[in-house]
Image: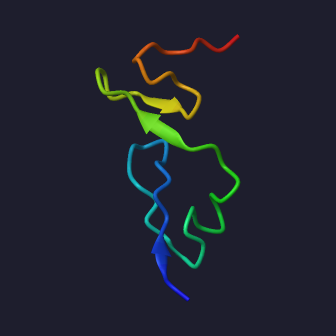
Amino acid sequence: MAFYRCPYILRTGEVCNRGSFRPARCQVHWNSPMRIPCKDCGVILPEEAREDGTKIRSA
């Protein structure tokens, strides 16, 4: 069984980096939606953000 590090990005912009046996995320963040930092401004966006760079407005 391998040991992994959690790649989840926190609100502060830091990576969680907790140890876990799950390849996706740690026990705290395994069910949380993944966030992606914007390439232009650095704002952390939800996983549903488009790949072409446009940001989705929440209702």
Give the residue drawn at x 62%, y 58%: 29
Residue 31 in picture, x, y percent from top left:
70, 54
Residue 28 in picture, x, y percent from top left:
65, 63
Give the residue drawn at x 66%, y 49%: 32
Asked if 15 appears above or below 56 in the picture, the reply is below
Q: Quadrant of residue 37?
A: top left
Looking at the figure, which quarter contains the C terminus? top right
Asked if 11 appears above or below 52 in the picture, the reply is below
Give the residue drawn at x 52%, y 24%: 49
Q: Is residue 27 left or right of residue 51?
A: right
Looking at the figure, which quarter contains the N terminus? bottom right
Give the residue drawn at x 33%, y 29%: 42
Q: Name, please, the residue furthest toward the bottom.
A: 1
Residue 21 in picture, x, y percent from top left:
58, 79
Asked if 57 appears above or below 38 in the picture, the reply is above
Q: Is residue 11 left or right of residue 24?
A: left
